[in-house]
Amino acid sequence: MSRLVITKGQDGKLCGMDPAGQRAYARFRAAVVSMQPGDTMAFTFRMPRNPKHHAFFFKKLQMLLERTEAFTELDKLRAWLTMGAGYADFVPGLDGKPNAIPRSLDFDSMDETEFSELHRATDEFLWGQHAQAILWPALTPDQRWKCMESFMEGFRR
């Protein structure tokens, strides 16, 4: 399997990042051009993590931490949200019941495409009644919803 790292040149065309990448891209392009109707090709790609998106996400978590008394540590809030978003592995606990272990969010374990999906799933989890009841247990459902609206309004892009 060849590793191909491409970029968009000043002319707007895709090309390899270095001489080896240019040769790999030329092979890939030739394979695509030579395909006949009905031929198939499989490939995977990785979008590098966007540091600005990463910082934005963690700023959002920090602001949420400041708005709730349910969590006092950012790492625990992050773990809870990660599990709520479905980014967890389930392993047998000491009692034999499944325990959720949140997946890592570091740059090496998750690319930008996966991180964007985690961000979307986290927001979706936060809009749910269960998450809001944990974050603001003393409030009514309507008050919780208004808290979430107010919080999310600060992060409109």
Image (tube, helix red, strand yellow):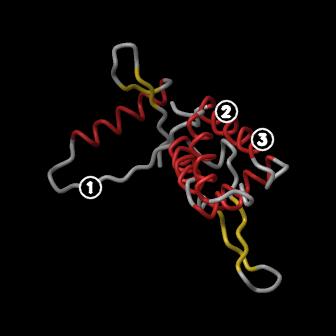
**Closest to the observer: 47 or 65?**
65
Asked if 112 appears above or below 141 in the picture, the reply is above
Q: CA distance from mark 2 to mark 1?
A: 39 Å
Label 2 secondary element = helix
Point out the frontmost of discs 3 and 2.
Answer: 3
**Closest to the observer: 22 or 85?**
85
Q: Residue furthest top?
A: 10
Residue positioned 37% across, 26% down in the render: 14
**Earlier along the polypeptide chain: callout 3 or callout 2?**
2
Q: CA distance from mark 3 to mark 2?
A: 17 Å
Query: Mark 2 = which residue?
Result: 55
- Residue 83 at x, y percent in the picture: 66, 61
Whether residue 2 sits left or right of residue 83 in the image: it is: left
> Would you identify the image quadrant in which residue 149 lies?
top right
> Would you identify the image quadrant in which residue 65 lies?
top right
Query: Mark 1 = which residue?
Result: 40
Number of the label disc, if any, that sits on residue 143: none
Point out the frontmost of discs 2 and 1.
Answer: 2
Query: Mark 3 = which residue?
Result: 66
Label 1 secondary element = loop
Whether residue 57 sits left or right of residue 68 in the image: it is: left
**Earlier along the polypeptide chain: callout 2 or callout 1?**
1
Asked if 118 appears above or below 21 in the picture, the reply is below
Q: 10 Å neighbourhood of mark 1: few (<14), some, or many (≥20)? A: few
**Closest to the observer: 45 or 30?**
45
Q: 10 Å neighbourhood of mark 3: few (<14), some, or many (≥20)? A: few
